[in-house]
Amino acid sequence: MTAIILAAGQSKRMKSGIPKVAHSILGVPIIKWIVGAVRATGVDRVVIVTGFGASSVESLFQNDVLFVRQEQQLGTGHAVMMAADFIDDEVLVIPGDVPLITGPTLCDLIEDRRTSDSDVSILTFAPEDPAGYGRIVRETDEIRIVEDADLNDSMRDITEVNSSIYAFSGGFLKNSLVKLSCNNAQGEYYLTDIVVHANSVSTVAARDDGEVQGVNDRIQLAKAQRYAQEKINLQHMKDGVTIVDPNTTYIAPGVTIGQDSVIEPCTFILGNTVVGKSCAIGPMSRIVDSEIEDDVSVVRSEVEGAEVGRGAAIGPFSRIRPGTVLERETKIGNFVEVKNSRIGQRSKALHLSYIGDANLGGDVNIGAGTITCNYDGKKKHKTIIEDGAFVGSNTALVAPIKIGEGSVVAAGSTITEDVPPFSLALARSRQVIKTDKYRQKTSGKENEK
């Protein structure tokens, strides 16, 4: 079985320089939502028909889907013609603007066609306002699709409409494509015209009408995200996660969260993120593509592409960047940035510091205002700080450099050479005091007044 996804259109109502299928819902492009649902049915291959902004759509995938180009957008039937070489025994056809369709609903459609042995099975639904949709017209043994503009008065009362999602017999589809005509006002080939040639047509209703809502403008995009957001949050709450304010919590479909975790308001958990049990995330936090173990707290902070060990505490106002590994019970605090570094168990950097391209052992203390000077203008260099080292406040560690086990770096130092284990390193000028230096100037100004 092949699935063909029609994603060539521009959608002028989006008023965008990128294809509408590349716009995102909860951080996931629309087209990827659809591919995910299609793969859940067990199809053998997925073919995406691209056109407007084709390269920006194709760049979203590796080698797990096939692409064909529809250089001229001449209708849905014409789009399927572009993929005719990939028609199998069974073909699933889906428009690229229904991101919320699910695998189970598509399985219902496929099973209906197989059970009824029909040429085509149509997924239908019944919106509150059917205006603008093609209606499913049933006359004796015949089922046909009548577009909104062609309805007579009696047909306007029909509430069952076409979702534009079909399961076809491959042989029927291939034979019918050659019969399509563009002899209409728009000069386009309509996939709905194929239904006329079918000897047998069946229908199956969508499990939830929300699954088949289309996205053609920014308003519908926001509406679709609200639907997905509510559904995802509801499932997490059923699974034992506390979401304090579901209306301001945004969780991507690929995220998993352990029981008894609490998600505070204004929090985004996106990408392929895993959050463990009994975590406290938020408020006002953003976690992307990260692995968070049990009992972790993230407060008003950003975590991206990182691994965070059990019992670690992040924030408030921390930024954890890609490549970072925080081991168990580490503490990263106010306005601290960590990038591409490993922070050992129970180590802490609590105030106003930058740690980049570094490897810290266990029980290391990083004082306020400390930075690793990892970039010389051309290359990045490594900083190594061994177990139990204490780095005083306002210290600059000029990489490449190694601070030995148990050593102490005095506050206000700029360290450019390795520090041996259990040593004290100072690199600052001696304090000089000149008494009464400013008394005369002060007295003079007072006299002037």
Image (cartoon, grey):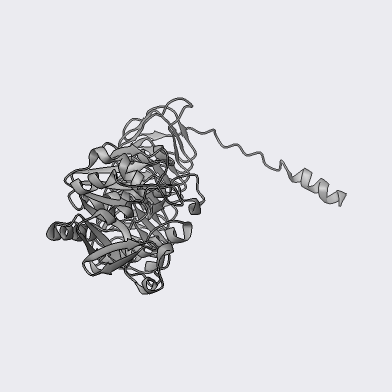
| Residue in the foreground of this view, choosing between 188 and 266 | 188
| Residue in the foreground of this view, choosing between 350 and 365 | 350
Residue 296 is drawn in which quadrant? Answer: bottom left
Residue 52 x/y as whole percent: 43, 42
Residue ID at (71%, 40%)? 437
Residue ID at (37%, 28%)? 418
Q: Is residue 81 left or right of residue 426?
A: left
Residue 265 x/y as whole percent: 40, 65
Count of marks placed on residues? 0
Q: Is residue 442 left or right of residue 414?
A: right
Question: Can residue 289 be seen?
Answer: no
Q: Is residue 294 above or below residue 125?
A: above
Residue ID at (52%, 51%)? 15
Residue ID at (46%, 38%)? 395
Q: Is residue 262 above or below residue 315?
A: below
Question: Can residue 361 be seen?
Answer: yes
Residue 279 x/y as whole percent: 29, 60
Q: Is residue 413 left or right of residue 124?
A: right
Residue 157 x/y as whole percent: 37, 74
Residue that protrudes farthest toward the right in the picture: 448
